[in-house]
Amino acid sequence: MILLKRILWVLLTFCLLINPTHSNVFANGDGNIDNGGGGMGSGTSQNKWTPGYDGVRITVVRASDQKPVSVSIDYTNKRPSTGLIHFGKVSKLHYRAGKSLSVQVGGYAYQIPATPMPRIISSGDSVTNIEVIKRYFCSEGAVKMVANDTGIDYNTLTDGNYKLLLEPIAYFTFQGGFMGMTAHEAALYDQLLNGGLRSKMVSLTHQNLPLAMFLETPDLGYPAWNGSASGRVSNHQIITSLGLGIVRFNDAPVTPPPSQTNFQYRANTDVITSVWLSTSDQITPDSPASVTFRVLGSSYTVTNIVIPEGDSQLVWMKWRTPSKPQSLSIQISSSDGTLSANSITASIVDLNQNVPPDPKATDRNDSFRQPSVPSYTAKKSSSWGVWSAHWHSDGEGHGWWEFDWTEYSATLSATQSVLPDAKSPSTTKSLKSGYGIDIRTSTIISSNAPSSHTTGVQTAVSYFPEFQYKSYWRLHDLKTGAYNASFWLKPNDYSTYRSRVHFTPIWYPDGSYTPITRVMDAWTPDGMLTLQLQTPVTISGNLFSDWHIAPQKNK
């Protein structure tokens, strides 16, 4: 069944809570939730799911920066066994930020709502009602339950600055063990098992569980789901787009996710551009797929791609951007399967500009107020993988292709020192305004992948509080490269000695002075690794106190 277009994001003024003892409980939530599902296969004693054994994980999220601000609470109408195998209380947002699966046995905490929840996951005999699900979780009663269980004041929770992230949970038997997991966790677990979970529980873990909730409109960096509302889905589709619903309050603004077909790259930089290749039928070594990227008059083809039925894989090219700023188009085509994008627009920018102006001894800024230190989005780890296949023979002249998943990962770490310039009279982290500071950064990329999959850090740029962390910045030079790259400031054109320093303004008030440095352009197939470093120094006095002017003595 192809997904029918429903009315997108109906703004609800009131929602009726299905409650046997209260008939008019008003709601103040707006549900961005839709669902689907399909028939269920037959199970065995070792691998089975009983309809109704489901729940929902709820996490309070700050709307402004999409950060979880509460512990996650699991709600279910059932009482899972004390020996339940689970992965703790980790939300989809935590996994997106780099959290990995951690298997736990027992100790599972959950809440049974006073008013039972509607059934969340469809089965072959029972199709859930998304409007009933919306009314329940948008209701005042449900929101107050979450406020109480997370310890967040109800009025604060509903003031428009927070959202509820909902994730459906399934409790089922797999390989004889009773397990509980969200759709996102099921996809990650299946990747670890090289498709072992999907092979036994596909109707639940790769159909009805992820399709139990998905977004009608983009939110929290996740896209609206425009695929089929029934049928099997891939691990990639689950991780990026399925198994979540969102409740917002008082028309909280929605920040759309960044377009996956528009990218910004720095000039003269090694980058990796990737797309997803998906297939509904298996792609085998008998007829492998190829993907071709075309950019700047050249083409790059990835060959011998194999993918199991209903799954996907990242495919990428590593290339160097042109030295001049421009906008260019990357065209992508494949011999088989479906690409996540056939065209990508890349903006090439040059950061070697907006250098701070020449500092003067007469400079003043009487209206200056210490700005808050901004926090740029960090991505310190990434993971991706490649499918391979081998022939499994039954010994009688027949056989089949078995697929293996090889997972790769990369992590970024960095340290920084901020010290007074060597020509400053101060040798500690306290200096007088007007003198320069020396900023040095060291980075490490750790990865189990071939070098063709990654780059080292290639860019470091520092921003300063006297410019409100914008308007002007200083680029760093690469001192040592590759996967243990180090950086220092470019020579300062206004320094008598062409020192690699930044001069603090003479007017800067006493107190903390915190430059920030963004470390960027460490590329992987799963995107760019980046982080922010900030190391404060203390301003105390100014350089005028080191000057002594006296009249010339008469001879």
Image (cartoon, rainbow, N blue to C red):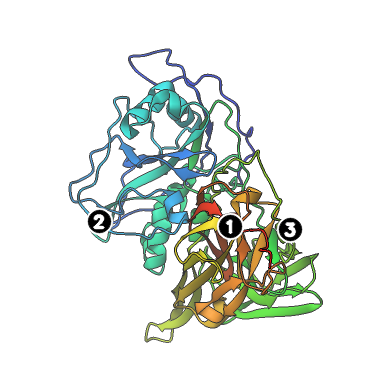
Label for residue 315?
none
189 horizontally vs 374: left or right: left
Neighbourhood count class around disc 2 (C-alpha, 10 Å): few under 14, some 14–19, many 20 upward = some
Which residue, given by chain and number where applicable, does mark 3 sit on?
357
Q: Nearer the viewer, residue 109 or 444?
A: 444
> Is 334 on the left-hand or right-hand side of 46?
right
Frontmost residue, 201 versus 394: 201
The reply to whether discs 3 and 2 touch (Cβ–Cβ < 8 Å) is no
Ranked by sequence position, the earlier of labels 1 and 2 is: 2
Q: Select label 1 or label 2 by which is in front.
A: 1
Regarding residue 234, the answer to whether it shows in the image is no
From the viewer's perspective, tell me whether residue 59 is left or right of residue 421. left
Say which amino acid is labelled 1. Answer: Leu
User: How far from the left and from the top, in percent, is residue 278?
Assistant: 58, 64
Q: Can you name the residue that lies furthest to the front here?
A: 555
Q: CA distance from mark 3 to mark 2?
A: 57 Å
Task: In the rendered view, tell whether residue 44 sits above or below residue 416.
Answer: above
Mark 2 belongs to which amino acid?
A: Gln
- Give the side of residue 146 with respect to residue 344, left or right: left
Which residue in the protein does label 2 denote? Answer: 104
Q: CA distance from mark 3 to mark 1?
A: 19 Å
Q: At which x and y percent is residue 95?
A: 43, 55
Question: Percent position (x, y) of residue 170?
Answer: 35, 46
As helix, strand or loop, the secondary structure at mark 3 comes to loop
| Tag of residue 543 | 1
Q: Quadrant of residue 421?
A: bottom right
